[in-house]
Image (cartoon, helix red, strand yellow):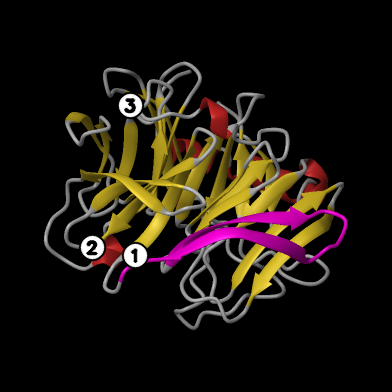
Amino acid sequence: MKTQNRLPLALLFCFALSMAAQENRGLDRMDFFYAGESMKHRMYIVERGEVAWEYSDPQGRGEISDAILLSDGHILMAHQHGIREIVPDRKTRDKFETLWKMDAPQGYEIHSIQPVGRNKVVYVQCGNPMEAVVMEIPSLKELRRIPLPFTDGGSHGQMRCFRLSKKGTLLLASMQLGAIIELDSHGKELRRIDLPGAWGVEELKNGNILGCSNRGFAREFDKQGRVVWDYDWSKNPDYKEISTQKAHRLKNGNTLMGNWFNEWSGRKIDPKNPDVQAIEVTPDGRIVWELSSWKAPADLGPSTTIQPLSEPVNRKKLRFGDIK
């Protein structure tokens, strides 16, 4: 996979992008779980091109920064002011059961969460201090606190995403420090990779790191921290404001990237030319899918998480150091 020169490549594929967008903008590209940061809490399961299940909480505080569909059918979510685990009722379009929930302490925010084994989770609590917390569920018994690197300032701008690696380390996308930082389960920093505007991070099957920036680009780094793949869709004039929230490498080798739409800014969706919520891009930079679904019967809202239903997360396989 070769390094991509972002600006020239974006211009080179401009025409191809427009053609692909016209041909493939539907919901039937894949079955997927979807969530995003919007002014009301919303999550969806899309199957065969239609919304099969939806979660809506207009009274919910904060924004859904992270949501994960698990192999047992449960959903873990972090929504700025708390975390919870729910079980969708797939027989009823809008029903669910809450298994447990926890509010963030006063003055703190929680934007990302991961399962650890059968009965534990780890989440990052933003604030002063900024810490990763391991907790038993559903008892909410705290098992460990791990200090994380941060600088003085508000909790809201510290981070949005972390993930656990196969070897049980924590990969932190630090928006505040502009880097992906790997730490062990006691807070020791193992490495740091520069990534301005770091928003999302995941470890790939080959051991490389895929990170994305709210400035509109995604980058793959090898084990030495060198850029081996790069894509910047904010350079394409066909797109409006681009803020990449998460990037995910699909089994077919393509990369799926979500785009946030800021509902707090007062900007409205243009019905004649609506913003793109996500794209699927090939290794050589060709767009093969655009998602733009802003009206009934599938008004999905801003995009943070797009997870193929064929790729649920198995909580039993995740560990955090010695914690399983």
Q: CA distance from mark 3 to mark 2?
A: 24 Å
In the image, taking residue 195 as reference, residue 273 lies left or right, namely right
Q: Amino acid at mark 2?
A: Gly
Q: Which residue bears the numbered disc 2?
A: 127
Q: Quadrant of residue 143?
A: top left
Q: Residues within 10 Å of mark 1 (few under 14, many from 20)?
A: many
- Give the overall secondary structure of the magenta segment: strand
Which residue was labeled with disc 3? 321
**Residue 97 x %, y %:** 70, 61
Question: CA gap, disc 1 to disc 2?
Answer: 7 Å
Contact, CB < 8 Å: mark 1 with mark 2? yes
Please report the bounds of the magenta region as a residue range.
Answer: 82-105
Give the labeled residue for mark 1.
109
Choose mark 3 or mark 1, whichever is in front. 3
Graded by Cα atoms within 10 Å as few (under 14), some (14 to 19) or many (20 or more), the crowding at tag 2 reads: many
Left or right: 17 as drawn, with respect to 137: right
> In this orientation, does residue 162 appear?
yes
> Whole-Å distance between the Cαs marked 3 and 1?
24 Å
Kindly identify the residue that appears in the image at 60 percent across and 35 percent down: 313
- Would you call the spot at circle 3 few (<14 residues within 10 Å), some (14-19), or many (20 or more)? some
Q: Is residue 80 highlighted in magenta?
A: no
Which circle's residue, 3 or 1, is located before the other in the chain? 1
Which quadrant of the structure image shows residue 152? bottom left
Three-letter code for the amino acid on which mark 3 is drawn: Gly
Q: Label for residue 96? A: none
Residue 209 position, x and y percent, is 39, 28
- Which numbered mark, 3 or 2, is in the foreground of this view? 3
